Amino acid sequence: MAQFLRPVLAAWAVPAAAIALIWAALLLREVGQGDLAWHAGMVALSAADTLAARDAKTSHIILAALTMSGVVVGLTLRAGRQRKRAARAHGIMQIAFEHVGVGVMVINPNGRIAMFNARSAALLNLPADFQPGRTERDLQNLQLQRGEAIGRATYSGRDGDIVRLFHQKMADGKIIETRTEVLEDGTRVQSFTDMTNAAQQQHVLTEARDAAEAAVRARAQFLAGMSHEIRTPLNGILGAADLMRTLPMPDSQREYADIIYQAGTHLLEMLTEILDYSKIDERGVELEAVPYCPAIVVREVVEVLASRATAQGLTLSTWPSSDLPDFVVGDPHRLRQILFNLIGNAIKFTPEFGTIAVGLAARPRDDGGWWLDGSVRDSGIGIAAAAQKTLFAEFTQSDGSITRRFGGTGLGLAICRRLVEAMDGTITVDSAPGLGSCFTFSIRVRASTQSPDQMPALGHGNGVGLIAARAPVVLVAEDTKVNRLVATHMLERLGCRVQAVVNGREAVEAVCAGGIDLVLMDIMMPEMDGLAATRAIRALVWPLGAIPIIGLSANAFRSDDDAGRAAGMNGFATKPINSERLAAEITAALGLGAAVTTMCDPAALDELRSALGDDIVGAVIRAFASDTPATLSQLRHDAEAGNLAGVGEAAHALCGNAATLGLVRLAEIARGIERESRQENGPTQAKLDLLEAEFAASLAALRPEPVN
């Protein structure tokens, strides 16, 4: 505006025009139009400047008027204030720019460095002559000359901007994190942060983590080695003692065999307890989710421990509640483990003529599942209130003399607590010295969507009868003589025919020779270990390459099981060999469980009742119950006399009778004995024992009426 009005005022050459502008500026300032007043004053000032050359007097008059009116002063003050504010803001920005704590560099779109602060120069080790105006290429060349490595960049988007982040190792060892943000006009703003301490801390943390993991691996290797070194001879001790107990011998010798077996079993329990806790401590509790019958689990545990309780003169009873669901979904192995620990403790701490009661009930949950409430009550020595506070802690016992008097590791209840808590439950104790103890626990399980007839058979289903009927040829690959002998005798008692080798190489050769139905493969053997032998067998052509293989190891760790299955093993058993577990693994590996999964077929018996009536079927059952013992006695007599024809006839008759009544497992065993009667050696003693045991169990399942 001043440039436009200046020639006009010069043309007028009248001071009145400038004075009018001054008055206008004053009026505008009074009504609050400061910006317009400022412009009017500037025009008047320009007029005075224009007139100064040809009419100094008029120019002075205008300047005097401006001065007297205060317009010039106001203009000057306003301009000064604006300059001060701008200078102050610039100073604040400059201070912040220099003291922000991180390096900042601004790079123009043309690649020239517009500015950078002192922190940038220090972090990037820039020389004194490196000033704004240099190019980004100059900076890169400088870093390349010093051998400074730039790490991998990562990119991300943020509101349309491009953000790039990378780490750079400087020549002096510093680790610099560079963050670059690209603005809309192409200007790049870079920030530099010293990450050296953070990187060092991360390195320390990484080293600490690696050291901790190495310690865990070392402990696992130590425990695996300890397990192998203890379980290998223990397998021989327990196996040989168990076999001795089946032989005819004087009572004094049998007592010694029982002592050996009981001491070995106690040692095995302690070792298993330590290893169980170690596995839980290392990896946490691993839970399965499979359908099972809780009442059967309780019954199985009580049946296993009943002989121990009876030997101590104790009464062990169980009372599963009638409201228990038939089947639930959870981890039956963990429930069994909890019950074994609690009932085992009750047996240990209850004096002769005492009582132990085991209960299990169920409460519905809002989500459709169940709470299983278990209890183990004994009339034992009891626990003081002070000792109950640490009862479920690791490596503790209520009294230091407990270990000396009763043995144990102090881990059983700690393991129970960990297992119960893993199933979202609780475990408590109510006890008083001299009055006994009551341990109660609750665990969460899901409801089963399967009906009972869809469930796999539980209990009394380890497949012993099926194995005996099949009489498979089992190759035992075991380098230790004692363990080889134990495995051989145990397999023969199950009804298997056995061949034995001492290493993996011989195992592969035996499989290649043919005639092997299943391999029991030790993991650790000389020349070729079990895993390598398994892989070699799996590489053979069919059907040799498909032969079932069960791994056998003295290491009670899941890693061995996983490694064995990865190599191609069908199952896995841990030393000391448990005949029931071994029978179950053999049954599964040979696919025998699919042939007969239940003791009896209720449908067959129902059809018989429909056709003949209850009275006649009852008479048939009574006749079967009374006549079969004589048949079994004659069958055994013929077998011992070498009358294989008589064995075959008796087995054939028994097979037919059992099939008629739906006793499918008994019929299967009898059919197997009939087949073996046509062979040179005939059935083994173990198979005859099995047949008699199965007959007794079948009668219990039929629940016949009393024989008159």
Image: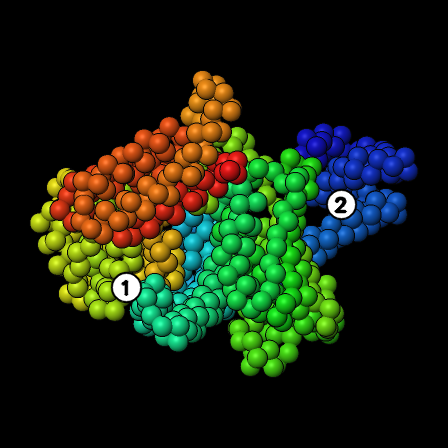
Which residue is drawn at the image coordinates 32% and 36% (left, top)?
654
User: Do we see residue 397 in this rendering?
Assistant: yes
Q: Position of residue 34 (x, y in %)?
A: 82, 39
**Label 2: few (<14), some (14–19) or many (≥20) C-alpha neighbours in 10 Å:** some
Query: Which amino acid, by three-letter code, is at mark 2?
Result: Ala
Q: Quadrant of the N terminus?
A: top right
Q: Position of residue 86 (x, y in %)?
A: 69, 52
Which disc number belongs to residue 73?
Answer: none
Q: Nearer the viewer, residue 635 or 695?
A: 635
Residue 520 vs residue 66: left or right?
left
Earlier sequence position, callout 2 versus callout 1: 2
Q: Identify the residue at the far left of this view.
A: 513
Residue carrying label 1: 486
- Element carrying mark 2: helix
- Element carrying mark 1: helix
Q: Which of 530 and 404 is in front in this view?
A: 404
